[in-house]
Image (spheres, rainbow, N blue to C red):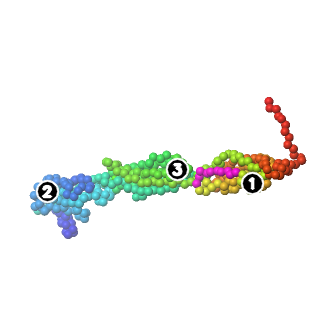
Amino acid sequence: MDILIKAFFNAVLSLSSVVAQVSYSIPEEMAKGSLIGNIAQDLGLDRKRLTSGKARIFTGDSAEYIELNRERGALLIKEKIDREALCGQTTPCALHFQVILENPMELYTVVVEITDVNDNAPVFEKSDMKFKISESAVVGAKFLLERAIDPDVGTNSLQSYFLTKTDNFALKLKDQPDGEKIVEMILQKPLDREKQEEIFLVLTAVDGGEPKLSGTAQVRVTVLDANDNAPVFSKTVYKATIPENAAKGTVITRVSASDADKGSNSNIMYSISNTAADVRDMFEINELNGDLILENNIDYEKARYYQIHVQASDEGGLTDSCKVTVELFHSRGNGKGGCNREYSPGFRFTSRQIKIR
Ligand SMILES: [Ca+2]
Ligand SMILES: [Ca+2]
Ligand SMILES: [Ca+2]
Ligand SMILES: [Ca+2]
């Protein structure tokens, strides 16, 4: 049938020297039965002529979206037209067809332009974007974001993007030759996991329709730890006193440091450092819990005061140090004569009054 019509159409083309044309412009999505135009009037024909000439539409291969109502002399919407389905990104979008009459044969070309309606909001294919970024990432680092799609055309299509206001990131749009935009998030202020470990942002895509339509996507940034904090002791000096007869193995005191980092970056090991060898021999530190333990018997006559330097190191090698002072006190009731027990003849306590002016 189509072939016959085409043959007929070709014959008409070759015979007919009068080919008039009429154009209409309608928005997409008009309801079925809506009036496109008064074709009889626009072609200067009497409505009766449409009936007597058996006026009809010839669309070739394209689907029939439009019908001719001979009685009303009007072109009507037969099927709702979706501009996006019909033309995609092509503009302008138009339906071309012929109105054919017989006795005598007449041929009219009709063009119906379908204008865009802003009936699509921008949509992100991936509405949840996740990033894991080290807090050591440098300012200027770029992170590619997903694009949104808006099938409308012209100003009804996607125009811009916005990101939740944040000090850390700025949005950068790069125009591509195909008219698309590359969306990047640029680090503009260093991240700090110790302050904020998760950052939730919303990326909004906006079209230029009237009214504007928009779509959103979540952008979730997990800040990964870097070893940017050294351990810190709770005190710079720990003071302890122990009886002169304290037994070997006595826990003298416990030092404690904390590290604001996470995981192995915050694992602390304690050690004795920078301490005279003979003092070092007297004490031991539990490298995990910071317990300072008496390792040898005390010789009260040798010293009554000890100063030990303790270092705390994280696994990344960052350190802090503190001092522990240990003072011995004379313990009564040990039944062994106390400090005089091992009195050496060559060692004598003397007292002298010093006048301070
Ligand atoms: Ca549209
Ligand atoms: Ca749109
Ligand atoms: Ca650390
Ligand atoms: Ca850190």
Determine which of the numbered discs, if any, sits on residue 294 in the image: 1
The image shows a total of numbered marks equal to 3
State yes or no: residue 300 in magenta. Answer: no
- For the C terminus, the image quarter is top right
Q: Residue at x 79, y 50 (%)?
A: 333
Q: Is the CB of the residue bearing disc 3 within 8 angstroms of ligand 4?
A: no
Q: Nearer the viewer, residue 6 or 344?
A: 344
Dot 3, crowdedness within 10 Å: few (<14), some or many (≥20)? Answer: few
Kindly report the distance in space between the C-alpha atoms of the residues bearing marks 2 and 3: 70 Å
Q: Nearer the viewer, mark 1 or mark 2?
A: 1
Dot 2, crowdedness within 10 Å: few (<14), some or many (≥20)? Answer: some
- The mark nearer the N terminus, 3 or 1, is 3
Image location (x, y in percent) of residue 316: 63, 54
**Relative to residue 115, is residue 100 depicted above or below?**
below
Dot 1, crowdedness within 10 Å: few (<14), some or many (≥20)? Answer: many
Q: Residue at x 47, y 54 (%)?
A: 220
Determine which of the numbered discs, if any, sits on residue 72 in the image: 2
Image location (x, y in percent) of residue 100: 16, 61
Kindly report the distance in space between the C-alpha atoms of the residues bearing marks 1 and 2: 111 Å
Q: Which residue is mark 3?
A: 196
Q: Residue at x 86, y 49 (%)?
A: 343
Amino acid type at mark 2: Arg
Name the side, left or right, on which 118 lies relative to 19: right
Name the side, left or right, on which 308 lies relative to 142: right
Magenta-drawn segment = 253-262
Q: Nearer the viewer, residue 170 or 36?
A: 170
Element on which disc 1 rests: strand
Residue 148 is at least partly visible in this image: yes
